[in-house]
Amino acid sequence: MDELNLKADEAVARFLDERFAVSQELGGVFFLLELLDTAIRTSDQELMDKPNLPENEKLDMVQALDRQNVMMQLYPRYIDTLLPLITEVAERTKREVRVLELASGAGGLAFALAETAEQKNLDVRITASDIVPAFIEEGNGIAAKKKLAVSFRLLNAFAMTELEMSEFDIVVMAQSLHHFTPGQLAVIIAQSARYATTAFVGIDGYRSMLLTGGVPLIASLQGIGSFTLDGLTSARKFYSELELDIISEIATGRREHRVECLWPFSVLTVRF
């Protein structure tokens, strides 16, 4: 995994260097767009990822993200993206579909998916996971109150050794791909291949001038300064579709993946 981490980081860095050189040769609008992308990109860490930030403040920020997603009606769109794959697994296996969500935060997507599965009479078992204990405690409390088939567990996405091989069918990560370096994301995809039978699905924004301005603007509606600043940092860290393509191929050694642009987000589906 250490070698994979390094290899993916180097490959994406080399791709960006080569693209800059080619754009410079082509000149004109090609080089202008490349200069804009170079100006946008950052490797700065979000405030919510800083280890010294108190867990209650991290919880406030992920709950703000959950409210924002509800306001923008993003969860129904994420679920529409996931349902065909869930239905495919259900029809093939004739049993419950086991979904693991990584970096689940406050659990908004997990709860929305569980409610939809209930409405559609789909047999789905959802396990939401994160590395922040406060998120797990909060999530399990809400799941008990709502009586939904969602459980939360503490899990390190880089080393899921406590899981059983093929314990899940689908691994999902929504709005968190950009929190990880290319190497870290490659490791997560490779780890997922060990513990999921069917696919890894990553849903996230994609790097653009429009989202760089739009994401922090929408985040500012929550009235939390740190959340707004993280919105700007996140938008600048979103991956392009080509970068996700490179990371996925390095993580699996195959081209059994697809990257789609479904405004305002990208969907990466890696088949196992």
Image (cartoon, rainbow, N blue to C red):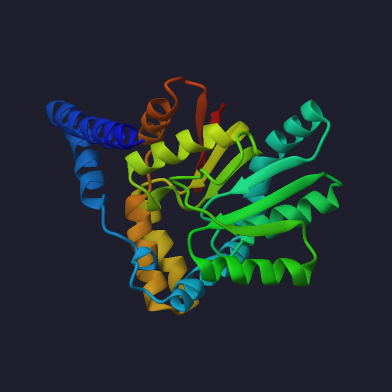
Query: In this image, 123 relative to 86: left or right?
Result: right
Q: Which quadrant would the N terminus be assigned to in this image?
A: top left
Q: Which quadrant would the C terminus be assigned to in this image?
A: top right
Which residue sits at x=77%, y=56%?
Answer: 149
Image quadrant in which you'd find residue 19: top left
Please state the horizontal and vertical placement of residue 167, each as a whole percent of the image: 65, 39
Query: In this image, 118 relative to 207: left or right?
Result: right
Image quadrant in which you'd find residue 214: bottom left
Q: Is 2 or 246 nearer to us in this picture? A: 2
Q: Is 125 or 211 nearer to us in this picture? A: 125
Which residue sits at x=62%, y=46%?
Answer: 100
**Is 152 situated above or below 250?**
below
Q: Is 208 or 90 nearer to us in this picture? A: 90
Query: In this image, 145 relative to 104: left or right?
Result: right
**Is 31 situated above or below 210?**
above
Q: Is 39 or 267 nearer to us in this picture? A: 267
Please state the horizontal and vertical placement of residue 177, each as a whole percent of the image: 44, 47
Please state the horizontal and vertical placement of residue 239, each as a whole percent of the image: 37, 43
Q: Residue furthest top?
A: 254
